Image (spheres, helix red, strand yellow):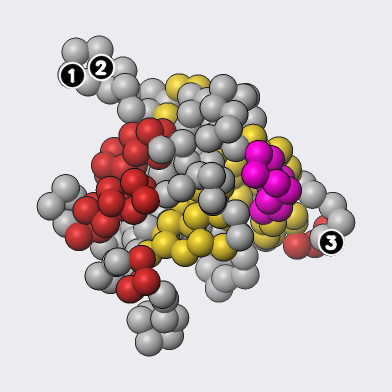
């Protein structure tokens, strides 16, 4: 992959091309590596801890995270495959008020509500995603063209954390309108770009941490 798709990883202090950050206009974008080690003693863990502290929300108001394997996934395919990474890093997503987390891997589309699952401990045995306005929205857009086809088998009933899901080929567009508001729209490929099958307005977590969207 490093030869086929070079990345600007050294500019952000990363030691591997699989995780890095870039700044584009008003967005600070962090790319994580689902299949590189991420335990507490690993380079990726240390790099992410340092990188999140560097984010200046007055310069780049939007904090966006990208990864391959989704943390919240209600399809049968790859179910809970990203769970160990979620346990390791999700608290940081809430602490630093990440706005949105994009993933792929699952060949379908799904958008979550703002939820977190960081309250578990051995005493309360609470291990259920709960509504959390400081948490990001998790969006899986793995439904682009591929040889394997779509994933159509889903867990039923639809989990409460899942706001919308559909197994159709499609693509998403993230429109940053200003420092406080952005619009995400998902389009089925067969519908044409003028029709959004799912959309949501997002209020920036840094400026509006208590807003519902």
Say which residue appears at 46% left-offset and 36% top-offset.
Answer: 97
Q: Could you say which disc has been placed on residue 192 in the image?
A: 3
Q: Quadrant of the N terminus?
A: bottom left
Name the one closer to the observer, 147 or 160. Answer: 160
Q: What stretch is highlighted in magenta?
A: 174-185
128 with respect to 25 (left or right): left
Secondary structure of the residue carrying tag 3 is loop
- Residue 162 in sight: no
Say which residue appears at 31% left-offset and 18% top-offset.
Answer: 126
Residue designated by label 2: 125
Give coordinates of residue 122: x percent, y percent: 18, 19
Say which residue appears at 75% left-offset and 56% top-offset.
Answer: 188
Q: How far apart are marks 2 and 1 (CA)?
A: 5 Å
In the figure, 143 relative to 78: above or below? below
Secondary structure of the residue carrying tag 2 is loop
Label 3 crowding class (10 Å Cα cut-off): few <14, some 14-19, many 20+? few
Q: Could you say which disc has been placed on residue 122 in the image?
A: 1
As for residue 183 lying within the magenta part, the answer is yes
Say which residue appears at 73% left-offset and 48% top-offset.
Answer: 177
Q: How far apart are marks 3 and 2 (CA)?
A: 46 Å
Badge 2 vs badge 1, beta-carbon distance below 8 Å: yes
Q: Residue furthest front?
A: 58
Label 2 crowding class (10 Å Cα cut-off): few <14, some 14-19, many 20+? few
Give coordinates of residue 79: x percent, y percent: 40, 45
Total numbered circles: 3
As for residue 177 lying within the magenta part, the answer is yes
Of labels 1 and 3, earlier in sequence is 1
Q: Quadrant of the C terminus?
A: top right
């Amino acid at each position: 992959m490093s030869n086929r798709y070079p990345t600007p990883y050294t500019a952000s202090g990363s030691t591997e091309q699989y995780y890095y950050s870039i700044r584009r206009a008003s967005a600070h974008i962090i790319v994580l590596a689902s299949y590189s080690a991420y335990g507490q003693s690993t380079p990726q863990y240390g790099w992410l801890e340092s990188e999140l502290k560097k984010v200046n929300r007055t310069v780049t108001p939007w904090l966006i995270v990208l990864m391959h394997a989704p943390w919240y996934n209600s399809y049968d395919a790859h179910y809970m495959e990203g769970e160990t990474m979620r346990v390791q890093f999700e608290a940081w997503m809430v602490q630093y008020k990440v706005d949105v987390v994009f993933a792929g891997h699952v060949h379908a589309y799904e958008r979550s509500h703002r939820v977190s699952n960081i309250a578990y401990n051995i005493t309360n045995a609470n291990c259920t995603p709960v509504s959390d306005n400081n948490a990001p929205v998790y969006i899986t857009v793995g439904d682009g063209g591929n040889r394997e086809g779509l994933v159509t088998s889903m867990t039923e009933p639809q989990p409460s954390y899942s706001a919308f899901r559909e197994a159709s080929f499609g693509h998403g567009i993230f429109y940053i309108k200003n420092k406080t508001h952005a619009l995400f729209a998902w389009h089925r490929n067969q519908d044409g770009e003028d029709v959004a099958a799912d959309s949501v307005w997002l209020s920036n977590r840094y400026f509006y941490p208590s807003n519902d969207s």
